[in-house]
Amino acid sequence: MKVVILAGGLGTRLSEETHRVPKPMVEIGGRPILWHIMKTYAAHGFSEFIVCCGYRSYEIKQYFSGYALRHSDVTFDLGTGATQLCNGTAEPWKVTLVETGLESGTGGRLLYVRPYLDGDFCLTYGDGVGDVNITRLVRFHKAQGRLATLTAVNPPSRYGVLSLKKGRVVRFREKPVSPDEWINAGFFVLSPRVLDEIRNDKSSFEGEPLRSLARKGQLSAYQHRGFWHPMDTIRDRQHLEELWRNGAPWKTWA
């Protein structure tokens, strides 16, 4: 099963970083967040990725073009001009980078990669990490027998909460999670037939395509109660960087 990653947006809310690199190339712990996402899937045996590129796509292409070289010893035969990579530690991934336009919607980007799909596939966003058990997610999708499955998470509050009693503060709760509220965290498993719901390259996948699938009873939700966090703002990036230094709860690989 191939993994499609949406990586073409402008990332305007993270403009402090995205004025120079596309959002998926913003680094956490010295590695692009795109790499962290791919490592999450690779930990469950996935090795073939399709990246939907758009804004500043050249930086993504440049990163992967030199990936093996950066992670290997190298011998240059100056007489023959030959180059030999030795003792490589690069992951055995196949990565296809597809130009999906600067202004395409998330649904439109999927239409561009349709020729590269040959069966059910995973889909996720290039700006969020989590310790989602992809193996269980795929198993759940197959057991449900529907066209699409999304991963639902409880969103943490952006603010701390005060507990009050007769005008007196009795305790603070730091950014509580509401167990009754769920949001779409990505980490989809989809049938190629889902693409028939997308009208054109301006379409947002999160809009009418998902609503249509829900109306037809063809959208399942895999409830993930572990760690998940998006990187929407510079504050998010700083938070993820701090988490990385202290153990990275999304790091499910060795």
Image (cartoon, grey):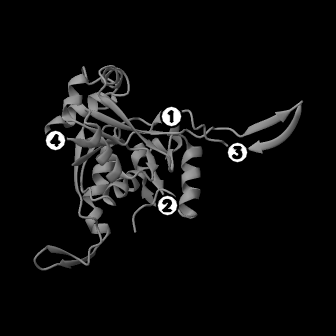
Figure quadrant of residue 220 = top left
Quick one: 36 or 223, which is closer to the camera?
A: 223
Q: Quadrant of the C terminus?
A: bottom left
Estimate the spatial distance between the alpha carbons at disc 1 and disc 4, rounded to whole Å. 28 Å
Identity of the amino acid at label 2? Gly
Q: Earlier in the sequence, mark 4 or mark 2?
A: 2
Identity of the amino acid at label 4? Gly
Estimate the spatial distance between the alpha carbons at disc 1 and disc 2, rounded to whole Å. 29 Å
Estimate the spatial distance between the alpha carbons at disc 1 and disc 3, rounded to whole Å. 19 Å
What percent of the width, then of the height, locates residue 15? 51, 39
Query: With 148 as the anchor, is 24 left or right in this view?
Result: right
Residue at which label 1 appears: 182
Secondary structure state at the residue bearing disc 4: loop
Label 1 crowd (10 A; few <14 / some 14-19 / many >=20): some
Residue at which label 4 appears: 119
Secondary structure state at the residue bearing disc 1: loop
Q: Earlier in the sequence, mark 1 or mark 4?
A: 4
Residue at which label 2 appears: 29
Residue at which label 3 appears: 174
From the image, state whether disc 4 or disc 2 is nearer to you. Answer: 4
Rendered residue at 48%/34% (across/down) = 183
Q: Quick check: marks 4 and 2 in contact, CB under 8 Å?
A: no
From the image, state whether disc 1 or disc 4 is nearer to you. Answer: 1
Q: Earlier in the sequence, mark 2 or mark 3?
A: 2
What percent of the width, then of the height, locates residue 37? 38, 52
Estimate the spatial distance between the alpha carbons at disc 4 and disc 2, rounded to whole Å. 34 Å
Query: With 36 as the anchor, is 167 left or right in this view?
Result: right
Identity of the amino acid at label 1? Trp
